[in-house]
Amino acid sequence: MTDGKWKRRTFFQSIGAAGLGASLAPSFAAAQTPAVRRFRMGFIGMGRRGLQNLRSALRIAEIEAVALSDVHQPNLDLALEILPGAKVYRDFREMLAAPDIDAVCISTPDHWHAYMTVEACKAGKDVYIEKPISVTVEEGRIMVEAARKYGRVVQVGTQQRSGLHFQQAVDIVRRGRLGKISFVRTWNYGNETPDGIGEPPDSAPPAGLDWDMWLGPAPERPFNANRFGVHPERWSSFRWFWDYAGGMMTDWGVHLLDIVLWAMDEDGPRVITTAGGTYALRDNRETPDTILATYEFPGFVCTYENRIANAQSLWDQSYGILFHGTEATLFVDRARWEILPEMKAAGASGRIARVTPETGSNSNDHTGDHWVDFVNCMKTRARPISDIEIGHRSTAMALLGNVALRSRQRVEWDPKTEQTPNKEAATYLRREHRPPWQLRL
């Protein structure tokens, strides 16, 4: 703005001109599916997220849910209450080999994602795979190659991309309505002190659990209740152990960083530095209770912060994304987006615009819309809104935050070649898989 003053009306009109009612992807309510076909689907991993995906899929007429697989009998029992009569596969490989199944949904712990996705593609199945797609960057790239080689539709469960108000926020950023963006902040805050998830001793696995199969490609370890992590009052704590996941950085950070890459039209950062550690909690988790990752891009800096020993946020939000531009700041989370003007002139304060999604399929979780997109792409063979390549890039960005932390190096990164000259950091880009679970295209 040439006069250096904030013009509320002009700015709001420019936002309106961007077409806030226009979606970058079909909404749940407006999805049009010209061809009528039912896809027979199997569901692998029937924990809390697996049950959510099953319920979302059952709302779609074109999906016929026919099969379930899990190594934990109580999980299967819960799923069978939702889908009585489903065929149960104790070994997911038998489900993948079944000729009458068109697609699978994989909601297992993260360390299984790569192997199962690659094998599903090889078996001619389309895939809905939960995020993060992998526990190493190399795994993710192999998953992309498998999808392309075998011509499969692979949708990643970064479902915020299917949320209309996230699409609006991305459009605002891309149209330059915030001015030049030089800094983006993402965060998750909470407080679990002092004991966190506790520190149970190793023990025998419970009845109804195939612990060796649960470990799969991960290193052999004695059973520990926190490594397995199933708990009636929280999300499974396997997420806090390096063998199976990447902590809050990859569990929640990937959702936030995914929107940053999308809005800023980037493939990945060029330099990553991370500080953090366990400073406050007294449990047996391996991932940090405090972490700050800084990502340098050619034109801006992005940070991801997670702390679980203090929940205070100046925005009174436990998580979110802030795009800081020369003209305004945009806040977005699953509930809304808001724009705050820069303090360039006296009296230029307060919100300039705010959008809260209507109650329904396109609010908060966005999983229903994401499944509609997946089904439509299975019909058309188009690439979904969270195609495996997109999910890989977003997962890799989160993983690189952990690579910098664990290697204690300033990681220089080429997002095109997915290589770094930092030798110690490079060792964290791949891992060995326990036999017989090697990745092979």
Image (cartoon, grey):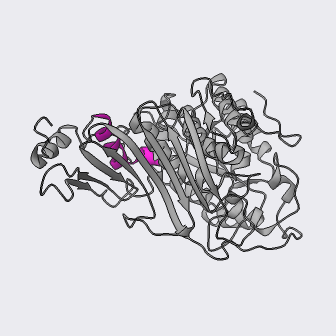
Q: Is 168 part of what is drawn in magenta?
A: yes
Q: Residue at x 34, y 53 (%)?
A: 331
Q: Is residue 99 visible?
A: no
Residue 317 appears in which quarter of the rendering? bottom left
Q: Residue at x 73, y 46 (%)?
A: 112
Q: Nearer the viewer, residue 224 or 416?
A: 416
Q: Residue at x 66, y 35 (%)?
A: 140
Position of 306 compared to 199: left or right?
left
Q: Position of residue 184 (x, y in %)?
A: 41, 45
Magenta span dominant secondary structure: helix
Q: Is 207 part of what is drawn in magenta?
A: no
Position of 273 compared to 85: left or right?
left
Q: Position of residue 181 (x, y in %)?
A: 34, 39
Q: Nearer the viewer, residue 439 or 351?
A: 351
Position of 317 compared to 411: left or right?
left
Q: Nearer the viewer, residue 156 or 98?
A: 156
Q: The C terminus appears in which quarter of the rendering? A: top right
Residue 415, compared with residue 50, is above or below; it is above
Which span of residues is magenta-colored?
159-175
